[in-house]
Image (cartoon, rainbow, N blue to C red):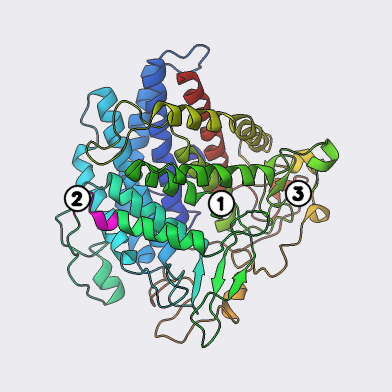
Amino acid sequence: MQKTYWNGTYWPTTIQWIGAFIDTLLIASERSLTGALEEYDGNVQGAKTGGSSINADILSYYSEVEAYYGDEDVVQIFGAAYDDAQWVVLEWLEAIRFINKYDSHAKSTLGQSDIARFAHRAHIFYNIVQNQFDTSLCGGGITWNPALAPYKNAITNELFLASSIGMYLYYPGDDNSNPYPSPSYTNATNATLPALPTLAAHDPLLLSNAQKEYQWFKTQNFTNAQGLVVDGFHVSDNQTTCDERNEMVYTYNQGVILSGLRGLWEATGDAMYLSDGYVLVSTVINATGWNAHSPLEAGVWAGLGRNGIMEDYCDAPANCTQDAQAFKGIYFHHLDLFCEPLPTTKPLVAGVTKLAPSSLANQHTSNCAGYLSWIEHNANAALSTRNSSGMIGGWWGASYVNRTQAPSLDHAVPPPWGSDDEWNQPWLLQQSPWACRGQHGCQPNGRGSHSGNSKRMARPFRSRKRQDANAEGRGRTVETEASGLSVVKAASDFSVNREAT
């Protein structure tokens, strides 16, 4: 991912929110490497790389994280939709988690001087959504994009859960009142901002935001008959309830909620949050055909894949946008976070988080160990898509349906009835019920008039004629490589956790 797509300061072929996720994944990979060093003391039997080399990699990748902080296009993403802002929050909270873990292990001060500025960026971007939970429509939740007609979607609200509980657990506080995401903000936007309000570490408001968000989400009927999370709800004209559900199902909507549930358990000790997470994970695994009774049955679309392999509706017909090419990676990243071992002897945050009774910790370990074979199956499927340069494709299940030769439209599955696939058919956002509401500067991709004027914008869909299903559409990209990294990292982490127990 880094050798091929990184230019020294950012990934120039992707867009801003995906860049924030890829950086999160890079940072999380460093935290995973640190955990492996802790577990194996740098001596993994049969490993190709020793502990000293892994440590050098960690330091090298951290320098790239610092470089990305300096070049992240925060002006654009600051003016984008409410989901975009929260990817940035999670990004820099993950960086703080890594720094603390690595320094504890290595007895170093790596990154300690960066924590304040990382925390400040997380604070700035959380402030965008902090007060957007709106009970006047649908009884709660956050609207996806205020430049569009009201749409309360799963991802924005799952991110509000994850970012709120993440801020409660990991944000160290910030006394910097500068509200600007970048010194160039005023010149780029001709706008001024009020001072950033103070927000202390472990502010109870953050926990309250996470709890009320999940309570609303759970009672809002976001799951279809199969138990999969659908995309969201429109509000019809002259209505205040979420009365029009979009039945579209995406892989990432099944995942982000998991890290939020894990965080709620950390903060409250209420095992209900973990139980809800186990149900969601089992639903997803079933929806890939993993538990089918025969190979023939396994090969039939099961709601979110086939042959035990996770798949988005756009994978087989190769019409995924950049956004959708990242979705499966997002799922496995958040599943990985959910299944980290529960602490039994030392709280995650002294005085703030809970310890797990041994019975609960053992049950969590057992449940998560039960996912390992499925995760490894998906990791192997992703690796099977590598081309001669070793780059991973987006349709992991191509070889399992004997579709290494393009095209693959005969394996495309129509989206659920009553669904709009707005991520892969972006022109829908110009039509009712999505269309802009007429505000000044209204743009479908952001809150303000500067939102579309960025050096890093999505490249248009292109069709290529190749003898390779994963070279169709956008082909192999930094997004498909990141998704592949995510599932392989998850398989590694789950294996390490199993060895540890």
- Badge 3 local density, few (<14 within 10 Å), some, or many (20+)? some
- Describe residue 152's horizontal placement relative to residue 265 as left or right: right
- Tell me the residue at 66%/60% (across/down): 462
- Describe residue 135's horizontal placement relative to residue 437 as left or right: left
| Magenta-highlighted residues | 200-206
Tell us which disc is closer to us: 2 or 3.
2
Q: Which residue is mark 2?
A: 173
- Tell me the residue at 30%/35% (across/down): 348
Task: Give, as a three-letter code, the residue at label 2.
Answer: Gly
- Tell me the residue at 63%/46% (across/down): 283
Task: Give, as a three-letter code, the residue at label 1.
Answer: Gln
Checking the image for residue 254, the label placed there is: 1
Q: Position of residue 76 (x, y in %)?
A: 38, 65
Residue 6, visible in the rendered structure = no
Q: Which residue is mark 3?
A: 466
- Describe residue 318's horizontal placement relative to residue 440 as left or right: right
